[in-house]
Image (spheres, rainbow, N blue to C red):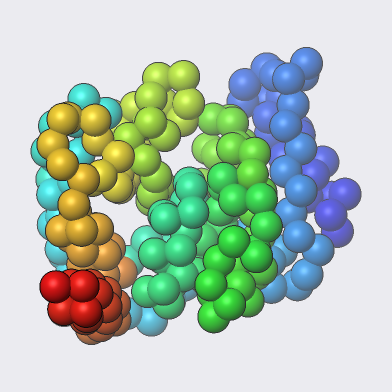
């Protein structure tokens, strides 16, 4: 089965990009659930009344930009640990088809390691543009640097192809302080995107309690 999938991917790579001499083989995990999620569009139950939902995020130029979601994303490519772990914490790890930038599950909290292990592709190496496009994502979550012209291309590149993007606020090098408020906002916005508002608010509440506890104990 793995050989068949790899062969199809390589064939598509040659047809779509002419990259016979620069082929990246995607090592998809050999388990039925991972293979199913990798090959077939996922379908998840959701509350239609929650959508459409509009989120203000940022583009490659660091400018605010609004994006509208008519349903929760089903095929997500997440780059770097904070992107992956936030989605796992929200309980939508089953939507991630590729988690890039983390070498091993041991770097995650124990309660998230099982979810992480079920992601079809995980690894420290970032996927190239052609491979990422062949995954047919409907959302890319990463840092500002992820959407540079020499990495996974600009946010505009993906938006023109009907793919939404989400950039972590604290990764934007605009000279502004990197605050916990940025982290809270990212979690709450991703909660809205996936219709996981209650879970997002719970996570932010837990973080705020821990911060307040530390402040009170060190006063």
Say which residue appears at 76% left-offset and 37% top-offset.
Answer: 25
Q: Position of residue 218 (x, y in %)?
A: 21, 73
Say which residue appears at 20% left-offset and 58% top-offset.
Answer: 180
Q: Nearer the viewer, residue 116 or 45?
A: 116
Q: Residue furthest front?
A: 219
Name the side, left or right, on which 90 lies relative to 77.
Answer: left
Can residue 208 be seen at all in this image of the molecule?
Answer: no
Quadrant for residue 65, please give it: top left
Q: How many marks?
A: 0
Q: Position of residue 27 (x, y in %)?
A: 76, 48
Q: Position of residue 21 (x, y in %)?
A: 78, 16
Q: Nearer the viewer, residue 147 or 213?
A: 213
Name the side, left or right, on which 156 lies relative to 29.
Answer: left
Q: Using the image, determine if residue 117 lies above or below residue 172.
A: below
Q: Position of residue 133 (x, y in %)?
A: 53, 37
Say which residue appears at 16% left-offset and 30% top-offset.
Answer: 175
Quadrant for residue 17, please give it: top right
Q: Nearer the viewer, residue 205 or 147?
A: 205
Quarter holding the N terminus is bottom right
Quarter holding the C terminus is bottom left
Say which residue appears at 20% left-offset and 39% top-offset.
Answer: 58
Q: Using the image, determine if residue 216 lies above or below residue 187.
A: below
Name the side, left or right, on which 174 lies relative to 38.
Answer: left
Quadrant for residue 38, please give it: bottom right
Can residue 89 be seen at all in this image of the molecule?
Answer: yes
């Amino acid at each position: 089965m793995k050989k068949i999938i790899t062969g199809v991917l390589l064939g598509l790579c040659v047809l779509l990009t002419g990259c016979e001499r620069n082929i990246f083989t995607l090592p998809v995990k050999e388990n039925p659930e991972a293979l199913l999620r990798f090959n077939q569009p996922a379908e998840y139950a959701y509350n239609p009344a929650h959508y459409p939902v509009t989120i203000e995020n940022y583009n490659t130029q660091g400018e605010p930009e609004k994006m509208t979601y008519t349903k929760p994303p089903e095929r997500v490519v997440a780059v770097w640990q904070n992107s992956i772990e936030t989605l796992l914490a929200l309980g939508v790890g089953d939507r991630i088809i590729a988690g890039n930038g983390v070498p091993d599950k041991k770097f995650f909290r124990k309660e998230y390691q099982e979810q992480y292990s079920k992601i079809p592709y995980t690894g420290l190496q970032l996927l190239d543009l052609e491979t990422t496009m062949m995954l047919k994502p409907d959302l890319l979550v990463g840092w500002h640097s992820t959407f540079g012209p020499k990495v996974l291309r600009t946010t505009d590149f993906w938006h023109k192809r009907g793919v939404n993007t989400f950039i972590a606020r604290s990764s934007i090098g605009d000279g502004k302080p990197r605050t916990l408020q940025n982290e809270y906002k990212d979690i709450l916005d991703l909660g809205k995107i996936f219709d996981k508002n209650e879970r997002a608010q719970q996570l932010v509440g837990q973080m705020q309690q821990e911060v307040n506890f530390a402040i009170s104990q060190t006063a």
